[in-house]
Amino acid sequence: YYYCVLFGYFPVLTEPLSNTFYNRPAVNQELSTIFNELWSLDVNRMTPGIDYTISVQGRASFVSQGSHTVQDHASQPLFSNVNESKLRNITTFSRFMTLLDNYERSTGVTEQVTTEELTEMDLFLDAVLETKVMKRAHQYLVRKGQSNLLLGFEHVFVGETKSGTEIIGFHNWVQFYLQEKNQHLDYKGYKAREHDLPDQDDHVLNLQFSWHGVVKPVGSAFIGTSPEFEMAVFTIVFLMNTERSTTVVVNIDQCQMELVVIRHGRSLGTAYPKLLSSNGRHVRQHAH
C-alpha cells in the first residue's frame, strides 16, 4: 500500500450561497470550545496586514456550475503580499509547500509515488504531530475515546490505496496564493450576503475564482492559518462523526462558520470551512 497525501482544490457548492443559511444545525458549543483552544495555540498562524495582505475587492456574481465564462469583480489578485520567507522558515509550512509540487492537478490521474515523496510526507506528518495544536487535539480525542490519533490522522489526510492515489480535498490558502502567483488562478471576487461583507482580517473567506480556465462558482478556505490547525480541526470533525457527509456550525475567534467533512470510505473525500458571519456579527445579533 502507498500512503499518498493529495491536496485537492476548493469545493463547488451546488446552490447559491444565499440559500445555504437556512436550516443549518445549531452551534456546536463543545467543538467551538476546543477549536478556540487550538486557535490560541496556533502560534504559526500568519498575521493579516503583517505576514500577508489580501484584497477582497468586489462581490462575485452568480455563475452556474460548469461555466467557462464569468465576470471578473476583482481586477487585482486576492493576495497582494505574502511573506514567503517566513513561510519557508516555519517547518510545517515549508514541508507542506514541498508536498504541493508532487501532485497532478487533474482528478483521477494516477500519481507515481517515489521514495523521496513518501519521505516528504512522513516529514510533514512528523512536523504536524509535534506542534502544540495537534498535541492538544490528541488529548481531546483521547478523552473522547478516540485514542489512536495517528491511525485516524492517516485515514483523514493520508490515503491508503493499492494504486497509489487518493483524492483528498485540502483547501488551503497557501496553495491558492502559489497558484495565483504562478498565474494559474484568477480570483473573481468574494461571496457573501449583502449585510455581511468580508474584510482583510477575516480568517475564512467564501470566494469565486477560475483555475486553469475552469470557473469555481463558490469556494471557501481558511486564510492565514497553519496546516496543523486546519488538519487538527478536520481530524476532530472526521473522527467524532460517522456520516458520509458531516456539517457542524462553530464559532472560532470572531467568525461563525460551517465545517464540512465528506468521506470516501475510510478516508477523507473533502473538508472545508464555509463562512457564515465574521467580525463577531453573530454575537451582536444574538445579544439583540
Image (cartoon, helix red, strand yellow):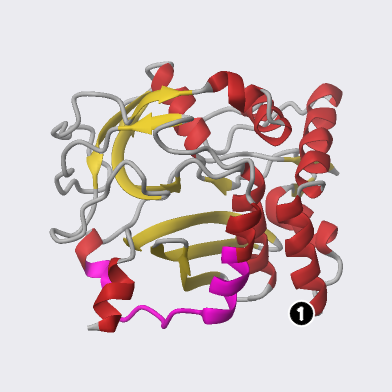
Q: Is residue 98 visible?
A: yes
Residue placed furthest toward the top: 182
* Residue 241, position as x, y percentages in the image: 63, 76
Q: Quadrant of residue 217?
A: top left
Crowding around mark 1 (Cα neighbors within 10 Å: few <14, some 14 to 19, many 20+) is few
- Left or right of 129? Residue 212 is left
Q: Amino acid at mark 1?
A: Lys
Look at the image and give the residue range highlighted in magenta: 19-36
Q: What secondary structure prevails in the magenta region?
A: helix
Q: Is residue 240 above or below residue 226?
A: below
* Residue 122, position as x, y percentages in the image: 83, 37
At 79% from the left edge and 57% from the top edge, which residue is drawn? 135
Magenta span contains residue 31: yes
- Left or right of 208? Residue 164 is right
Q: Is residue 233 above or below residue 106?
A: below
Task: From the viewer's side, name the closer residue of 101 and 39.
Answer: 39
Q: Is residue 51 above or below residue 241?
A: above
List the residue tagged with mark 1.
Answer: 144
The quarter of the picture where the N terminus appears is: top right
Magenta span contains residue 57: no
Task: From the viewer's side, name the closer residue of 16 and 89.
Answer: 89
* Residue 214, position as x, y percentages in the image: 32, 32
At 83% from the left edge and 57% from the top edge, which residue is drawn? 150
Q: Is residue 218 visible?
A: no
Task: From the viewer's side, name the closer residue of 157 and 30.
Answer: 30
The quarter of the picture where the C terminus appears is: bottom left
* Residue 3, position as x, y percentages in the image: 80, 42
Task: From the viewer's side, name the closer residue of 198 and 165.
Answer: 198
Label 1 sits on a secondary structure element that is loop
